Image (spheres, rainbow, N blue to C red):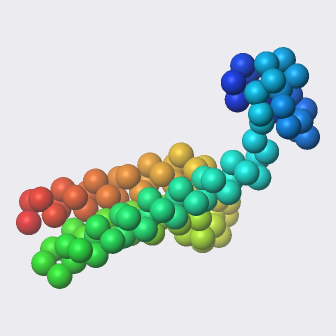
Amino acid sequence: MPECDSCGHTVDESAEYCPSCGAPQQSPTQKRQLLGRVSYAIGFLVIVAGISVLPNNLGGVLVVLGGMQLFPPMRHLLGRVLGRPPKIWANAALSVLLVAIGALVIFLL
């Protein structure tokens, strides 16, 4: 059973409010939708940043790949290759690693 976002008390999955503190609860579907929207927005910004340096510097390729990795469909594609989708934190860590290496290449070249 899920826990309250505010107080940590166990709440029923269908509960709209915590029985202990009265805080409104988000459903797992709402959280997943919000996370997907944020992933798309951040990924888009990273891709635009990578494309802006591409004509002069190949480090932008790694930055673009890091931004693409933030898109949920890429996570599912990686899941097909690996047999199961990676955890969200592992996917974000891979993206940050690609962007960091790309930024390093941009600044060194």
Question: Is 66 situated above or below 16?
Answer: below
Percent coordinates x, y for residue 97 in the rendering: 35, 53
Left or right of 46, for residue 31: right
> Is 65 placed above or below 88 here?
below
Residue in the picture at 44% in, 49% down: 93
* Percent of width and height locating residue 53: 20, 73
Task: Point out the residue furthest to the bottom here.
Answer: 55
Quadrant housing the C terminus: bottom left
Which one is in front, 23 or 31? Answer: 23
Residue furthest toward the left?
Answer: 109
Q: Which residue: 43% across, 68% down? A: 44
Residue occupying image coordinates x 67% and y 63% = 83
Q: Is residue 82 visible?
A: no
Can residue 23 be seen here? The reply is yes
For the point 52% across and 64% down, which residue is it? 40
Q: Quadrant of residue 15?
A: top right
Toward the viewer: 72 or 62? 72
- The quadrant in which residue 61 appears is bottom left
77 horizontally vs 30: left or right: left
Residue 103 position within the rendered picture, expressed as x and y whole percent measured from the top left: 22, 58
In the drawing, does residue 24 fall left or right of residue 55?
right
Q: Who is closer to the viewer here, 35 or 63?
A: 35
Q: Count the numbered circles shown.
A: 0
Residue 33 % position (x, y) = 68, 57
Q: Quadrant of the N terminus?
A: top right
